[in-house]
């Protein structure tokens, strides 16, 4: 999940038959569009939400194993770098447990095995949501980053994001891809609804964005990055982000051109890993671009309604941390205090989550 303005990403890009991710103005494209993902329209969202059944199977092994206790406290939340993260304001949170790393493929597989859960990206599409599209083209899938062969202008994300039939958490970039051997990688192609279903089963919940940022700051003074003031402390990359020329040439200088196994980079002072870069992480808060103008200071849970001026009427939730596709040339949402956003039923191959648990 860097700001300079917001570009619109439209629902699903099924070859030439779908409306592809919309492009915003050239001036607003730089840095704001870090979370490109397939958007679903309201009727599809309503249908998918209705189709989800609450699982009555609770993880019998739910515990605080592989979680870190975060003592409650007060901190300065937000950043002046981006309009939707202003103003910086004091926030107090209660203590909570947080996963020490992002939910992995192995952990999500255990959930699916126990509940037979089917993710949004794997579910059939409703023809009523796509009038005029041939039925044989209505194939389940999701958004996938596909690097162009040459350098391109950064004002049209359709040049590197594609809707790929068959892309889902087990096949992150399409049917030919696999998570075999990647059990310790963060699970991706996860929508907000998928993440919430997992958290409910595990006896946990998704973090509020205040809890997420408080854990990322780990009691340290406010700095440009969660890890400090320098992009490369002691000449080493502190997180899995994009190096090279975006979007066509990722040099992988930090050791990875895609998602890295969890805990591949140093943890923060609390022993929490990958809170910046690697994959975007869902939070429980609904997204409003103006929320920080009126947010409560005591254990905020987010606004009652969602609003993104670029896509009015589309329900979105907050995402945090940026991803391996965040570049200082385009998307730098790994900057401390910055925010991301995503439509409730949307997923892509750089989007995952972690959970928290109350005491």
Image (cartoon, grey):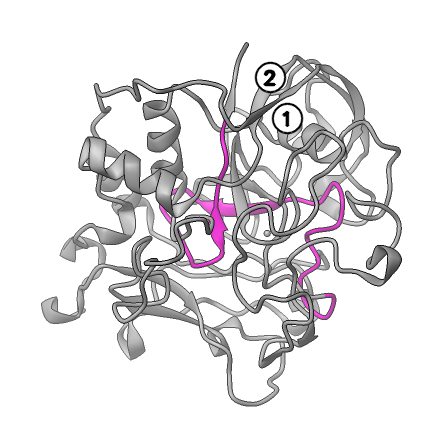
Residue shown at 33%/51% (left/top)? 41
In percent of width and height, residue 64 lies at: 50, 19
Q: Is residue 18 above or below residue 72?
A: below
Q: Is residue 301 visible?
A: no
**C-beta proximity under 8 Å, tags 2 and 1:** yes
Report the magenta residues as a range. Answer: 328-355
Numbered disc 2: secondary structure? strand
The tag earlier along the polypeptide, 2 or 1, is 2
Residue shown at 86%/42% (left/top)? 223
Q: Quadrant of the C terminus?
A: top right
Check residue 96 in the rendering and tell me which mark sits there, or answer none: 2
In percent of width and height, residue 259 lies at: 52, 59
Residue shown at 84%/48% (left/top)? 224
Numbered disc 1: secondary structure? helix
Q: Is residue 211 above or below residue 15?
A: above
Front tag of 2 and 1: 2
In percent of width and height, residue 75 lies at: 80, 24
Outermost residue toward the front?
181
Q: Residues within 10 Å of mark 1 (few under 14, many from 20)?
A: many
Q: Which residue is mark 1?
A: 211
Q: Is residue 135 above or below residue 249?
A: above
Q: Is residue 338 magenta?
A: yes
């Amino acid at each position: 999940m860097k700001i300079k303005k917001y570009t619109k990403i439209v629902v699903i890009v099924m070859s030439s038959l779908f409306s592809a991710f919309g492009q915003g103005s050239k001036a607003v494209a730089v840095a704001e569009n870090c979370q490109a993902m397939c958007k679903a329209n309201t009727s599809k969202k309503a249908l998918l939400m209705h189709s989800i059944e609450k699982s009555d199977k609770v993880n019998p092994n739910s515990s605080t194993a592989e979680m870190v206790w975060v003592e409650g406290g007060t901190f300065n939340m937000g950043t002046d770098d981006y309009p939707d993260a202003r103003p910086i304001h004091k926030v107090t949170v209660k203590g909570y447990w947080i996963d020490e790393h992002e939910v992995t493929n192995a952990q999500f597989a255990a959930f699916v095995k126990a509940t037979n859960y089917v993710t949004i990206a794997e579910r059939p599409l409703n023809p009523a949501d796509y009038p005029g599209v041939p039925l044989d083209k209505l194939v389940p899938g999701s958004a996938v980053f596909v690097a162009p062969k040459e350098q391109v202008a950064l004002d049209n994300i359709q040049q590197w994001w594609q809707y790929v039939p068959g892309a889902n958490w087990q096949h992150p970039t399409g049917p030919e891809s696999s998570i075999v051997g990647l059990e310790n990688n963060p699970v991706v192609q996860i929508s907000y609804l998928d993440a919430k279903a997992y958290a409910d089963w595990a006896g946990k919940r998704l973090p509020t964005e205040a809890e997420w940022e408080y854990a990322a700051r780990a009691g340290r003074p406010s700095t440009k990055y969660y890890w400090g003031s320098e992009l490369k402390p002691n000449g080493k990359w502190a997180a899995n982000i994009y190096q090279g020329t975006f979007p066509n040439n990722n040099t992988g200088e930090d050791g990875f051109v895609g998602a890295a196994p969890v805990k591949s980079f140093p943890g923060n002072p609390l022993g929490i890993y990958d809170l910046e870069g690697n994959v975007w992480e869902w939070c429980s808060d609904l997204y409003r671009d103006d929320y920080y103008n009126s947010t409560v200071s005591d254990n905020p849970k987010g606004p009652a309604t969602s609003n993104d001026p670029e896509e009015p009427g589309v329900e979105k939730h907050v995402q945090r941390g940026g991803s391996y596709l965040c570049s200082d040339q385009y998307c730098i949402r790994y900057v401390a205090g910055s925010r991301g956003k995503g439509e409730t039923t949307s997923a892509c191959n750089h989007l995952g989550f972690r959970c928290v648990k109350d005491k």
